[in-house]
């Protein structure tokens, strides 16, 4: 009989619940957009629907979850959700165990993604792997010899929460996908006849996705935004280099879908921010698992139970 596991990704914009086999290959999927106005209760309703759909069809052994925020693994509770109300302090592990009757393991989504990329993605040939997710927020995870590095509860490697300066500006507020969306919106206001304005039209939200087409058209404003963003991300990652000195840094999340132009911009700037004793700077690569990265990592977590 085939062996199956349940993997769950809980983010600020999407929920994914997948069934995977013993090789962490996804064989079935439930996906839903996060209705932020419905809060955590709405996400739990969707998880319940997915469970009802899957548990009769597959002999599931365990559940792994990548949660979008700091998670207190010792107590099985959500420490904080910065994007969806109603999660803080919720005993999520117990809730999921009660509903499924299965063993459950929950970790931060960036940690979970880091595990997926380290074992089955761009970090397979490296023992020290740092993954940064650049989406609605900014998170990080460190994997050493195939295992997630954990600090004191409730979290670690939260690069997005680190302060850019003494004013309280965070790396996340400068580097995440939503931050780049804001840059694009400002550019559109300032250049209403430019390529970005023409591409985005009246769309609101997710404007960063138009950078790729604008760059292909040789738009100078898009090049400026890309250069600024690449430099900001490189500055943030230089702190990771000095603290962890990973062999490779992997860029994931929605912003990474810009592709090699973003990777190259980060890779070009990172060495200049890293002290000479730590040269060469870490290799910079794009995530290979794409939007499945958290789900694959969650399946690997479940397999470890």
Image: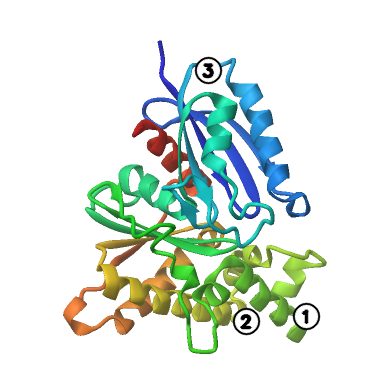
Instruction: Determine which residue is flagged by label 3.
Output: 58
- Say which element carries label 2: helix
Asked whether the residues under the numbered discs 1 and 3 touch, taking CB atoms below 8 Å apart as contact, a structural biologist would say no
Which of the pair 302/237 is nearer the observer?
A: 302
Q: Nearer the viewer, mark 1 or mark 3?
A: 3
Residue 193's disc is: 1
* Residue 33 appears anywhere in the view: no
Question: Could you tell me how far apart the alpha carbons at marks 1 and 3 are, in whole angstroms?
Answer: 54 Å
Rendered position, 179 above or below 146: below
- The quadrant in which residue 233 appears is bottom left
List x then y, in percent, for residue 215.
58, 71
Q: Quadrant of the N terminus?
A: top left
For image coordinates 62% across by 44% down, the residue present is 15
Q: How far across and down, in percent of the image, does residue 185 sit?
A: 72, 76
Where residue 221 sits, quadrant-wise, is bottom right
Report whether 260 appears left or right of 208: left
User: Where is mark 2, residue-wise?
Assistant: 221
The reply to whether the C-beta atoms of the residues labelled 1 and 2 are less than 8 Å apart is no
User: In the rendered view of the protein, which quadrant contains the C terminus?
Assistant: top left
Q: Residue at x 42, y 42 (%)?
A: 297
Residue count near mark 1 (Cα–Cα under 10 Å), binned few <14, some 14–19, many ≥20: few
- Furthest toward the left, the residue is 277
Q: Residue at x 49, y 69 (%)?
A: 160
Q: CA distance from mark 2 to mark 3?
A: 50 Å
Would residue 202 appear left or right of 250 to someone viewing this image? Answer: right
C-alpha gap between disc 1 and disc 2: 11 Å
Query: Is disc 1 placed on a helix, strand or loop?
Result: loop
Q: Is the residue 246 above or below the residue 66 in the image?
A: below
Q: In the rendered structure, which disc, 2 or 3, sits on the residue that comes first in sequence?
A: 3
């Amino acid at each position: 009989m085939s062996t199956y596991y349940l993997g769950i990704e809980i983010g600020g914009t999407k929920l994914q619940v997948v069934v995977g086999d013993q090789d962490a290959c996804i064989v079935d999927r439930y996906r839903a957009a996060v209705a932020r106005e419905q809060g955590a209760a709405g996400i739990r309703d969707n998880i319940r629907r997915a469970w009802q759909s899957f548990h009769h069809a597959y002999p599931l052994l365990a559940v792994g979850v990548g949660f979008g925020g700091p998670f207190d693994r010792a107590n099985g509770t959500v420490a904080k959700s910065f994007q969806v109300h109603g999660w803080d302090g919720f005993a999520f592990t117990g809730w999921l165990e009660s509903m499924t009757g299965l063993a459950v393991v929950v970790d931060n989504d960036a940690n979970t993604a880091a595990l997926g990329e380290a074992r089955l993605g761009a970090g397979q040939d490296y023992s020290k792997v740092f993954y940064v997710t650049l989406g609605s927020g900014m998170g990080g995870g460190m994997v050493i010899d195939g295992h997630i590095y954990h600090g004191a509860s409730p979290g670690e490697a939260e690069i997005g929460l680190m302060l850019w300066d003494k004013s309280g500006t965070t790396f996340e507020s400068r580097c995440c996908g939503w931050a780049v969306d804001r840059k694009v919106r400002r550019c559109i206001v300032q250049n209403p006849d430019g390529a970005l304005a023409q591409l985005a039209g009246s769309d609101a939200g997710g404007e960063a996705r138009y950078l790729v087409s604008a760059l292909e058209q040789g738009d100078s404003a898009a090049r400026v935004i890309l250069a600024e963003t690449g430099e900001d991300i490189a500055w943030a990652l230089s702190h990771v280099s000095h603290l962890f000195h990973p062999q490779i840094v992997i860029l994931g999340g929605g912003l990474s879908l810009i592709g090699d132009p973003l990777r190259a911009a980060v890779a070009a700037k990172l060495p200049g921010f890293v002290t000479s004793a730590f040269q060469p700077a870490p290799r910079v690569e794009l995530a290979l698992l794409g939007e499945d990265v958290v789900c694959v990592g969650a399946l690997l977590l479940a397999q470890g139970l």
